[in-house]
Image (spheres, rainbow, N blue to C red):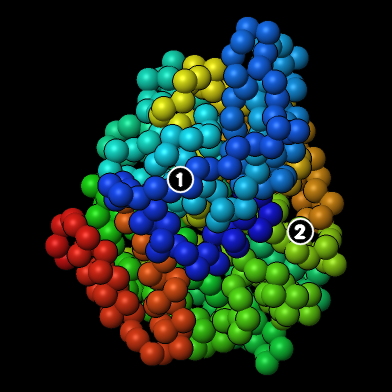
Amino acid sequence: MSLRSLSSLLLAASFGSLAASAAPAPAKATPTAAPAVPAAQAAPANKSGLAPIEFWVNSQTDEKYYQNMIEVYKAKVDPAFQANVRSYGFTEMPDNLAIAIKTGVNPPDIVQLDEIYFSLYLRGTIPFADLTSRIEKSDLNGGILPQRMGLFRWKDHVYGIPQSVSGVVLYYRDDIFKEIGIKPSAIDTWPKLEAMAKKIHSDARSMLVLDWSYFEILMRQRGYELFDAAGNPLPDSVAAVSTLRKIKEWKDKGVGLMPDRGSMFEPEFFNSYVQNNGVLAIVGADWYGMDMIQGFDPKHAGKWKAMPLPVWTDSLSHGQSPTSSFSGQGLVIFKKSKQQDRAWKFIDWVMTDIDANVERYLQGNCFTPYRPAWTDLRFNRADPYFGGQTLAGLFMELAPKVPNVVQSPYRAEFVQLFREKYWNALMQGATSPDSVYHEIKTQLLSKGGTKP
C-alpha cells in the first residue's frame, strides 16, 4: 500500500456516491469517458501489432515500481511487452474505473484495487475476470499465504491477487520505552498493557492512539469476522459489542487518546502527537509502519520498533493470537479486456518473481504474501529506521497466525457507516456499543440479506 493512499480512501467525502457509481447506470445516463493516457506517456504498439497493456495504479510510488518491473519483465520474459502505467489519486481511481466500466471507453486491462472498493462491485455482475482457474495452474496456488486470498474471493471465485500480508503489529517508541522502563514483555497481554498505560498516562502522553480501524483489527485478533460466510454483516453480536465496549473503555481510562484533529492515517496526527512524543504505540499493519510511520515521522528514525500484538486473555476470545490483519490492495483484470492472457502473464510473473517481491519490500511499501520469496536473504536486512530490527523477520513469524478475511458486498458500506456516523459518537459517549452494533447491522441489512 502506497504512502497516504489509505488516508485518502478514508477521507473520501464521496464514499456513498462511489457505491452508487459501482451499480449499473440508469438507462438515460451518459457518463463522461475515462481519460486516456496522454500520448506523450503512452507506449506504442509493439512489432506484433498488439496494443500496450493499460495498467491503472493508485500512486506515483506504484507507478514507478511497476514501470521498473515492466522493464525487468521485458528483459527476463517478453521483450515485446508494452504497458502504459497510469497513476490516479486513491479516491479518483474508483470514479474513473466506474466510468470506464459503464462506457467501455479507455478501459484498463489491469487495475490495482483496494479490497474495500472491490466490495462495491459484488452486488451485480462483477466486472473483473475470474482468475480462479488461472491461479490453480500457477505457483501462486499454495504460494500466496492462504488467509489473504479471501480479500478478492466471492462465492468461491477469486478475482484478484493480494499484494500484502497486512499483518498487524504494535509499533512502539523504543527510546521512550527504555527511558521510562517499559519492556515489551511487560505488555504482551492487553491487561498488562492497560495497567502500564494507566501508570504512564498524563495530559501530554498516552500509550495508544485510538482509531476506528481497531474495531475490525481486534475482532479478527479475537477470532471473529465482520461477515459470515454468505457475506452478511456482524454475525457475532456478543464479540462485537464486547470489542466496542473495550475500545471505549480504553479512552475513558486513559489507555489511549482520540486525536482531536484527523485520524492516525493523516499527517495532522503525526504533526500534533507523534512528533511531540504524545503517543508511544500504534496498532497497525505491515504497510502502516513501512510506509506511513516512516513517511510521516522522519524525525524519529531509528527510534521506532515493532512487536507482536498483546494477546487477549478473556474467555470470549478464541486462542491468544499475537496478530491480526487490516485492509490490502490487489491486482485485478478488467473482464472486457481483449488482452487477458497477456495481462495475466505479467501479474503471475510480478507476483511470483523473487526479485520483484523483494524490491516492493525494500522500497518501503508492504510485505509480500508470496511465501517462496521469504527465503531471500535480502529480507533479513537490519532496518535502520526501526532501530536495526529485522522487521521482515517479525512479519514472517506472525504471518501463519494472520486471520482469514471474509469479503462482503457490505464491506465498503460498513466502513462508511462506522467511521463517518458512529465512531466519534461512540467515543464521545453519545451512543452505546449495543446501539452501534444493532443500528449498523439493521441499516446494512435493509439493503438485503439475513435479518438480524
- Which quadrant holds the C terminus? bottom left
- Give me the disc on residue 178: none
Residue 233: percent from left, percent from top: 28, 59
Q: Seen in the image, is 299 located left or right of residue 357?
A: right
Q: Nearer the viewer, residue 391 or 449?
A: 449
Q: CA distance from mark 2 to mark 1?
A: 32 Å
Secondary-structure class at tag 2: helix
- The residue lying at 66 percent from left, 30 percent from top is 84
Taking the spot 78% from the left edge, 80% from the top edge, the residue there is: 276
Mark 2: amino acid: Gly
In the depicted structure, whether residue 164 falls above or below residue 168: above
- Point out residue 238 in the picture as x, y percentages from the top left corner: 27, 70
Closer-to-camera residue (139/9): 9
Left or right of residue 387: residue 141? left
Q: Position of residue 427 (x, y in %)?
A: 46, 84
Farthest-out residue, top = 48
Q: Of the residues shown, which amino acid type is indicated by label 1?
A: Ile
Q: Residue at x 68, y 90 (%)?
A: 202
Q: Name the residue located 32 percent from the left edge and 77 percent from the top edge.
A: 436
Q: Mark 1 and mark 2 in contact (Cβ < 8 Å)?
A: no
**Dot 1: few (<14), some (14–19), or many (≥20) neighbours within 10 Å?**
many
Viewer-side residue, 397 vs 140: 140
How far across and how far down the image is residue 80, in percent? Answer: 68, 11
Q: Residues within 10 Å of mark 2 (few under 14, many from 20)?
A: some
Q: Is residue 404 visible?
A: no
The residue indicated by pointer 1 is: 99
- The residue wearing badge 2 is 295
